[in-house]
Amino acid sequence: FLLLAVHGGKLTVRTVLCEQYHTSLIRDPLYNEYLHRIGQLFFGVLPKQTSSCGGFL
């Protein structure tokens, strides 16, 4: 289904899919990172903001 959403370029479809499959996606923390990167590349989602201290605070 994600490939269909990518092909259609619809952010709302991606968002609904992520919500529907949330319980499966939380099994592996990397899934969220992958989906966020897909969102950046194909749906115009902004990159995550990182702290200027590199996360050490």
Image (cartoon, rainbow, N blue to C red):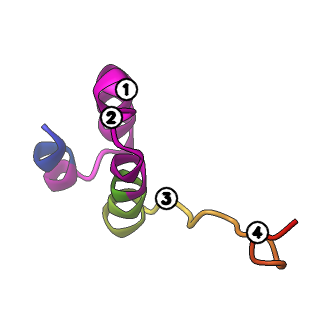
Foreground disc of the pair 2, 4: 4
The residue stretch that appears in magenta: 6-33
Could you tell which of marks 2 and 4 lies nearer the N-terminus? Answer: 2
Which residue shows up at 18% across the image and 49% down it? 8
- In the picture, the quarter occupied by the C terminus is bottom right
Question: Residue 43 occupies which quadrant of the picture?
Answer: bottom left
Seen as rendered, the residue at the extreme right is 57
Q: Which tag, 3 or 1, sits closer to the chain's start?
A: 1
Residue occupying the point 71% across, 69% down? 50
Q: Nearer the viewer, mark 4 or mark 1?
A: 4
Q: Is residue 36 above or below residue 55?
A: above
Q: Residue at x 39, y 63 (%)?
A: 37
Q: Nearer the viewer, residue 46 or 30?
A: 30
The residue under label 4 is 55
Name the kind of residue labelled 2 in the image: Leu
Q: Type of residue at label 1? A: His
Amino acid type, mark 4: Gly
- Proximity of marks 2 and 1: CB atoms separated by less than 8 Å: yes
Amino acid carrying mark 3 in the image: Val
Answer with mark 3 or mark 2, whichever residue precedes in sequence: 2
